[in-house]
Image: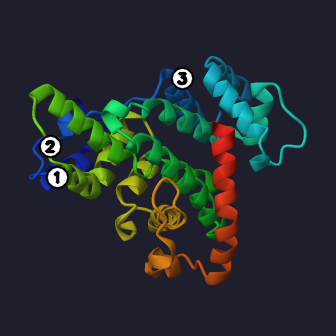
Amino acid sequence: MTLPAGSEAASAALSLRTSDHPWLRPDDLSIPMLPDQAQRVLHLVGDPDVTITTLAAVVSKDPVLATRVLGMANSALYGAMSPLRSVSDAVVRLGTRTVRNVVVTVSMQSQFKSPEVYGHDGHSFMEHAVGTAYVAHLVADHARADVEEAFLCGLLHDIGKLVVLKTAHQYQKKHGAVIRADELAAAVKHHHALCGALALGFWNVPDEVRDIVQHHHAFEEAQDPQAAAICYAANLLSHRYGFGCAPEGDSVLEDAVFPYLELDGVWLARTDVRAPGLFNAARQALG
């Protein structure tokens, strides 16, 4: 497997850190790929000159994507008062980057359903990813940061966990080997951030997003520490609320990232009310 440009550092770091997991090598990662239409949307949204008509035409070619984009545009999340019936109108209401985020979400949902590969982790992963994305939007809004980029980073922050699970599955299938559950859990915990950064290189996700995903557990080391801190804080809060995982409650609030981002008790109390509602509305809109 040829690594994309810009992935050399992450590849080298993964090689150095996975000596206990010889099956988890950069050149042997089993990376799920986004469908062609989703790849096309990612490319188009990166073009500052893209037109609504062009983007809507690409989304409309996939009935599932078109339905989900329309559903999101008509949801309470976007204050929909009158129903829209065209994808072009939905793109106008949502904005191109929100459409990108919806398309990536739907595409990920379709990729990670296989119980043979992921067990119950695929469904839980998507629940956690969507919850973290919406919390990241709230955190970024408070920090006056880029809310759409924060959403995308929250959505993708744990993608490496599924890369590790798929790689382990393929290795065991190919070699007739058995990877112990504790070894697999350790690999997921310690290497998912690097594996995620490598995977996103194949998805042509912007470098800044890949860097945030790689450093979301060590935000001080990121090129943009504030953006990585937003992703990390959103992840902790998603665990606090039990989005795709067992709720951890107040135990996460002792982390230094919260004063770093000036997330005080007043903001937290407001978010405790808003976040679950956003999460449930998003689940309904996305199907």
Amino acid, disc 2: Ile
Label 2 with label 3: CB-CB less than 8 Å? no
> Looking at the picture, does residue 172 appear above or below residue 35?
below
Q: Which residue is mark 3?
A: 37
Q: Which residue occupies the foreground of this view, 206 or 98?
A: 98
The local secondary structure at tag 1 comes to helix
Instruction: Report, in whole angstroms, how far the alpha carbon at label 2 lies from the one at label 1.
Output: 7 Å
Q: Residue at x 49, y 61 (%)?
A: 231
Amino acid, disc 3: Gln
Q: Which residue occupies the foreground of this view, 196 or 237?
A: 237
The local secondary structure at tag 3 comes to helix
The local secondary structure at tag 2 comes to loop
Instruction: Report, in whole angstroms, how far the alpha carbon at label 2 lies from the one at label 3.
Output: 35 Å
Q: Which residue is mark 2?
A: 179
Amino acid, disc 1: Glu
Foreground mark, 1 or 3, reads 1
Query: Quick one: label 1 or label 3, which is nearer the N terminus?
Result: 3
> Looking at the picture, does residue 239 appear above or below residue 156?
below
Q: Would residue 219 be visible to someone looking at this image?
A: yes
Instruction: Give how far across and how far down residue 45 sits, in percent.
Output: 59, 35
Quarter of the image where one finds residue 73: top right
Query: Quick one: label 2 or label 3, which is nearer the N terminus?
Result: 3
Label 2 with label 1: CB-CB less than 8 Å? yes
Image quarter (top left, top right, bottom left or bottom right) of the C terminus: top right
Name the mark on residue 183. Answer: 1
